[in-house]
Image (cartoon, coloured by chain):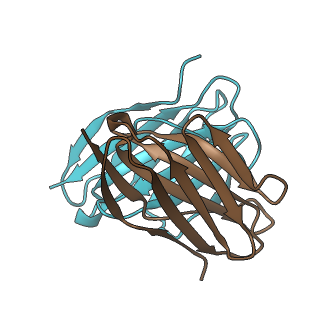
């Protein structure tokens, strides 16, 4: 069974640019979660998608947005990038609606803002 | 404000030692507590503890939930260098499945 895949592995941008990160969940999983892991900080919940709908978002500004496609893959968009957006962005999927229960994580996208 | 605290933040032990990692939480309407191991990138699931399952064990790893003390411990016996990782504690609260809060993690280094 293929795990959660994320692309790209690394992404380098400059301030003010826009970044798009992609995630493919485990086959059969309908829920996708996005987390930000900044250096020295724990995972911060960003967004939760299920069945194509945004179910909830964490305490992040509106320039963090995303969507889930009919095949359950997901995209995270970050507009007007700032230096503090530099972090590892992790995507996770689960087979149960809602974050209760184990989530399976991808290897993440390392976003660096110069 | 809901929060999850882990201690210690960093730990160095020798192979063969036994370690205990701590997680304490303050969340509204606790539902479950999860432990993850993060080596290079992707956290991998270890245990989930709920009111109906307060103790889990898998090989050399075990975890206990103390709902009265609002805490959990993760024990690793006979540690190996492959146990070196960041151990993350996450707590699910609320009744609307909308909040998963991760602690800062404990960085464990096992030296030969």
Left or right: A94 as drawn, with respect to B83: right
Quadrant (top left, top right, bottom left, bottom right) of the N terminus of chain B: bottom right
Location of residue B68 by image quarter: bottom right
Seen from the viewer's position, the closer of residues B52 and A103 is: B52
Left or right: A39 as drawn, with respect to A4: left
Outermost residue to the left: A114
> Which residue is painted at 27% across and 57% down in the image?
A86
> Which residue is painted at 77% across and 45% down in the image?
A97
In the rendered image, residue A76, in percent from the top left (x then y), is placed at 47, 46
> Which residue is painted at 79% across and 52% down in the image?
B53
In the rendered image, the vertical position of residue A9 relative to residue B2, given as above or below: above
The answer to whether one can see residue A22 in this image is: yes
In the rendered image, residue B91, in percent from the top left (x then y), is placed at 63, 62
> Which residue is painted at 35% across and 52% down in the image?
B108
Q: Colour of chain A?
A: cyan
Outermost residue to the top: A1
In the rendered image, residue A7, in percent from the top left (x then y), is placed at 38, 32
In the rendered image, residue A100, in percent from the top left (x then y), is placed at 72, 51
Quadrant (top left, top right, bottom left, bottom right) of the C terminus of chain B: top left
Outermost residue to the right: B52
Seen from the viewer's position, the closer of residues B6 and A58 is: B6
Q: How many marks are shown on the rendered structure?
A: 0
Q: Colour of chain B?
A: brown
The answer to whether one can see residue A99 in this image is: no
């Amino acid at each position: 069974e293929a795990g959660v895949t994320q692309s790209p592995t690394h992404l380098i941008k400059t301030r003010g640019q826009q970044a798009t990160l992609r995630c493919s969940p485990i086959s059969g999983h309908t829920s996708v979660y996005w987390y930000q892991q900044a250096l020295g900080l724990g995972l911060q919940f960003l967004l939760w998608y299920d069945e194509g709908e945004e179910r909830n978002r964490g305490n992040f500004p509106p320039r963090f947005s995303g969507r889930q496609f009919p095949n359950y893959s997901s995209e995270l968009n970050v507009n007007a990038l700032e230096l503090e957006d530099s972090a590892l962005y992790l995507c996770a999927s689960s087979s149960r609606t809602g974050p209760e229960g184990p989530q399976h994580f991808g290897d993440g996208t390392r976003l660096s803002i110069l | 404000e809901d929060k999850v605290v882990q201690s210690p933040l960093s730990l160095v032990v020798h192979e063969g030692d036994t370690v205990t990692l701590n997680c304490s939480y303050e969340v509204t309407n606790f539902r479950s507590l999860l432990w993850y191991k993060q080596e290079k990138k992707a956290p991998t699931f270890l245990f989930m503890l709920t009111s109906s399952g307060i103790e889990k064990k898998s090989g050399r790893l075990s975890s206990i939930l103390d709902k009265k003390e609002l805490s959990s411990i993760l024990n690793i016996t006979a540690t190996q260098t492959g146990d070196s990782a960041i151990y993350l504690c996450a707590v699910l609260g609320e009744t609307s499945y909308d909040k998963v809060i991760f602690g800062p993690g404990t960085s464990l280094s096992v030296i030969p």
